[in-house]
Image (cartoon, rainbow, N blue to C red):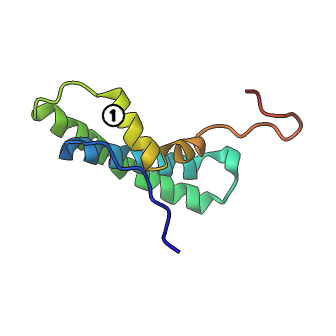
Amino acid sequence: MEPPEFPPLPALTRAEGEFVDRYLAVLDQVGRINPAHGGDTYSALRAAQALASGAAALRDALALMHERGESRLHAATLAQALRVLDGERRAGRVAMPPPKDRPPVN
């Protein structure tokens, strides 16, 4: 049995790829800190510490894009890359979960 085939990533510049990677890393850290998901303080502390360096790496990726003359964020292309890289699930960890006593609002 072959593994499932994932959709291809859209064509990105190296700087855009770095930006997407760093953005997702920051999302992951914020998701680990989210108090609505429970967990322990030590894990949240470690994630907060990693968030600081992740935010700096995200800033550096954006600065590189700017220095290279990439003045626009191409939302459709970057959103497609985020979806391929499981960005919707990862961003969902940042959001508040629905209350247990009522169904989610659509």
Total labels: the figure holds 1
- Is the residue 89 above or below the residue 74 in the image? below
**Element at badge 1?**
helix
Residue 86 picture location, percent across and down: 49, 49
Circle 1 sits on which residue? 77
Q: Amino acid at mark 1?
A: Thr
Viewer-proximal residue among 72 and 12: 12
Give the residue furthest to the bottom: 1
Q: Residue at x 57, y 55 (%)?
A: 44
Q: For this view, does 99 lie left or right of residue 74?
A: right
- Which quadrant of the figure contains the C terminus? top right
Residue 81 picture location, percent across and down: 37, 42
Give the residue furthest to the right: 101
Residue 64 picture location, percent across and down: 16, 39
Q: Residue at x 76, y 37 (%)?
A: 98
Q: Residue at x 87, y 34 (%)?
A: 102
Give the residue furthest to the front: 1
Residue 72 picture location, percent across and down: 23, 24
Q: Residues within 10 Å of mark 1 (few under 14, many from 20)?
A: some
Q: Quadrant of residue 41?
A: bottom right
Q: Residue at x 50, y 62 (%)?
A: 4
Q: For this view, does 18 lie left or right of residue 43?
A: left
Q: Quadrant of residue 80?
A: top left
